[in-house]
Every structure is written in C-alpha cells, then in structure tokens.
Image: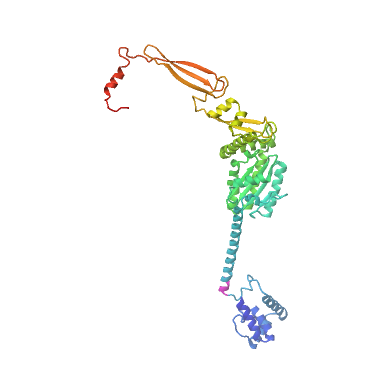
Amino acid sequence: MRRGWLGVRAAAASTPRESFFLSCMCCVLRYRCSVTRRRSITNSDCGNATLASLAGCHPGPSIFHSSLLMARRGAGVDLLSPLAKLGHSRDLAEDIKASRKRSNKEIIASFEKIRTFDEIHYRKTDRPWELVPKYSKKRVSDLCGLLTTEDRMEIEQTIDKMQSLCEVDMYVVLVPTVGYTTPKAFANSIMFDWGIGEPAGNGLLLLIAQHEATVHLVASPAIEEYFDTHFLEPAVREIFQPLVQEGKPSYATVQLVYAIARQAQEMRPLWQRGLLAMSTRNKVRFAVKTLSYGVFIVPYLVWGSLIFLLCSVVLVNQMLDTLCPKCNSLMSRVRDDKTMREVMTRGQYLEHVNGCAFYRVWKCPHCEDGNRVVLASRDLHQSNRCLQCMDCHYYTCSLTKEVQKLPTKEEDGIKQLLYTCENCRVGREVLLPLLRPLDMKPEEKWYDFLIDRSQTHKKTDIKL
C-alpha cells in the first residue's frame, strides 16, 4: 500500500497539472495503472488516454467520478475494501494475516493475564468471599462476565417470580475462582455473611466457579433436603453441562435457574407442612447441624472447649477462695506455723503436720475473723498412719499390729489391731484369729521338714 501511494505521488510531481487529472481518470478505467508500474507519463500518453476516455464515456460524469475516487484514495481507504487490494502484492496480504494472528494472540494473552490477576487476587485474600459485591436491588453477581445482558435480566425476573410465588429468597453468584478455599466453604460463607433467607429460612444460593469448574447450591437448613445432591447432580449433568459444552454458558445458567424454580414450585407444599414454622424449624436444624459438626467432624473443638471450660472453672474457684467472706477483700496467704495453728482446727493442723493432707490457709488483714482454710489434696498412700477416725472423722488415726499368740497344730493364734486417734485420743482394739494350718499328714511331725532341710545344708565356719 505504501509503495502504490508513493508511486502516485512521484507521478503527480513529474507531470504537468493539466495531464495529471487525465492520467488519474485513466487509472480508474484500466486494471493495471501505469502509475503503479513506476513509469513516467508523457504528454502523448496522456493525450491518448484522454481520447480513449472521451470516446468511451461521457466527459462530465466520468471526470467527476474519477476525481471523487482519487480524493477518496488520497484520504485513505480501508485495507479490507476492494480498492485497497488493487496493486498489492502477496507480501502485503501475508503481513495483514500475520498482524491479525498477532492481534488475536495479544487479545487472548491479555484475557489470560486478567484471569491470572483475578486468581492471584482471590488467593491472596484470607476471606475471598468478601470480594463478591452484594447489590441492593440485584440478585445476580457476575464477576466472570459470562452472562449476557438479556440472560441476566431473565434470571432477575425468574428470581422475582420465585420470591412472589414460592416465597424463596435466591441469589446467583459467578466468580472466576474461589481462591485456596473450597467451593462449599466459599458458598456457605457468602450465605452466612449476606444472611440469605434469614430469619424465614427460605434462602438459596447458586455458586458457579469458573476456574474450579464447579456448581454448588446452598439452601437454608429448613429446605436443604429438597435441594441436595440428588437434585443438583442430574440438573447439572442433563441441563447445564451439555449447553456449556456447546459454548453457551450464559444460556446454561438461565436453564439451571429455571430448573431450580420448577423444583421450588413443586416442593413448596411439602416444606410448608409440619408442626413447627419454617423460621423455628430453621433455627432448630441449624443448632443440630452445628452440634453434629462440632462433635463428629471436628471433635477437637468440642474437647478443647470442654477443657478450657474446666480450667476456667478451677481458676475462678481458686480466685473466689482468696476473697474474704465478710468484707469481700483480698486475703493474704498464711505460711507460718503459729498463725496456721490459730486459724486451723486441731484435726486439720495434725493432718497437715503428719503429711496426710495439704491445706491452703488465707487470712484477711482487715478483719480479725476473716479467714479461710481450703483442702488442696489428701495423701491416702499411708495406710498405717493416715486413717480416718470413726469419732472425729479426721485422718489422724494410726494403726498398730501385734501377734499375741502364734497358731499351732492344736489351736489357733491371736493377732491384735490397735487403732489410736491422735486428735480425739480414742483407741480401739480389734483381735483377729490366726487359723491353725491344716494337717494333711497327721502321722508325720510338723517340724520334720526343718530337720530334713538342716541336714542338706553344709556347715561353714563363717561367724555372723
């Protein structure tokens, strides 16, 4: 194109002004212009061209038409017009094709770059569902640009009819990606943050994630049994997926919304039955779902909460022990033996001294009678010293064992158990019989085994 235009300008500069107009008229009539062949135009050529043009057509209209075409060509002609293709070489056509391919690649690369930026933006955000805007009067949030204007308006009208006829609060969200979270968690987070269907319990959310190629439908607990996977999987497999494979994602979304609307219209009489209202049923099912999630899916949360609650109760009880029961002021810890003997009872003091129990003693510095004795722990391993007395009920009783008479073959022995309380000074004596051994061989002496064993042992000179 540039070569042809330079040839025209060179020819126009080398010829007179009178012959330039005629030569241009000649260019229109011929298939190959002499100007494009880079040949100078003489006066005779121009005259011949003038005679030929005047003989073949009317001079007035042809001259005006030729000047108009020349003016258009000088102003610039579209590369795709038939006039622009006159005199072009194959190299120029190949350059045009290459530029088209290059522009298409640049457009596709820009789309991929925008998509990559969206994915990075969603994955860098800790709460990617907060990037989805909630419009005040719109029920469709298309962040991918998949929906056309007509289909978007049709979905809005369908949702409005569902709200009036079926009493269902529905939203449709299309996102390029859900980030590092799962589509289920992404959809549940939007459902919870937006408060869809609250407090009536009639909410529906349709989420379509482009990068993950997933469709997720979330319903309120009161109606979730009618929009579970048994409904969604056939709808996606038979309605949504074939249209997407044909290259109609916008129309596929419209048909999927229609399928959800038909399901809501058919199942509306079923979920309105029951003794409980939908709002009450929604709250009860949400509580049961939360409890089952904590117990069966993430049990460490429940056990962690119980352990934290137990530790909190213990700490609060210990803090309450430090308050004075009379003036409610903080008491100080008592550690000296003299003050502990004054504050504690004799039985408590004996238990503490003997190591049978451990007490925490608190005394109020503001009031004289403000004190508190708290049992922290008790040692039950000392079976002969820290026994509970049957009279004073303190663990200050000790046990003494003594064998008064050994058993023989003819009569039983006697064992004495003496319980003595250090606090109340009361003693109890218990006599237990030691049964004589049974004589399995009455003809033998009972000490014969000692004689036999002494004969088998060797004598030594070691003196002990």
Q: Residue at x 60, y 57 (%)?
A: 115
Q: Position of residue 55 (x, y in %)?
A: 68, 82
Q: Is residue 320 left or right of residue 416?
A: right
Give the position of the C terminus as an image quadrant: top left
Inspect the magenta stretch and tell me whether residue 91 lies in it. yes
Question: Image height check: is 315 above or below 15?
Answer: above
Q: Position of residue 329 (x, y in %)?
A: 68, 35
Question: Image height check: is 135 above or below 293?
Answer: below
Q: Position of residue 364 (x, y in %)?
A: 66, 33
Closest to the observer: 196 or 179?
A: 179
Q: Which residues are magenta?
A: 89-93
Q: Residue at x 73, y 80 (%)?
A: 60
Residue 30 is at least partly visible in this image = no
Q: Position of residue 64 (x, y in %)?
A: 72, 78
- Most prominent secondary structure in the magenta stretch? helix
Closest to the observer: 333 or 248?
A: 333
Question: Image height check: is 338 above or below 104?
Answer: above
Residue 10 is at least partly visible in this image = yes
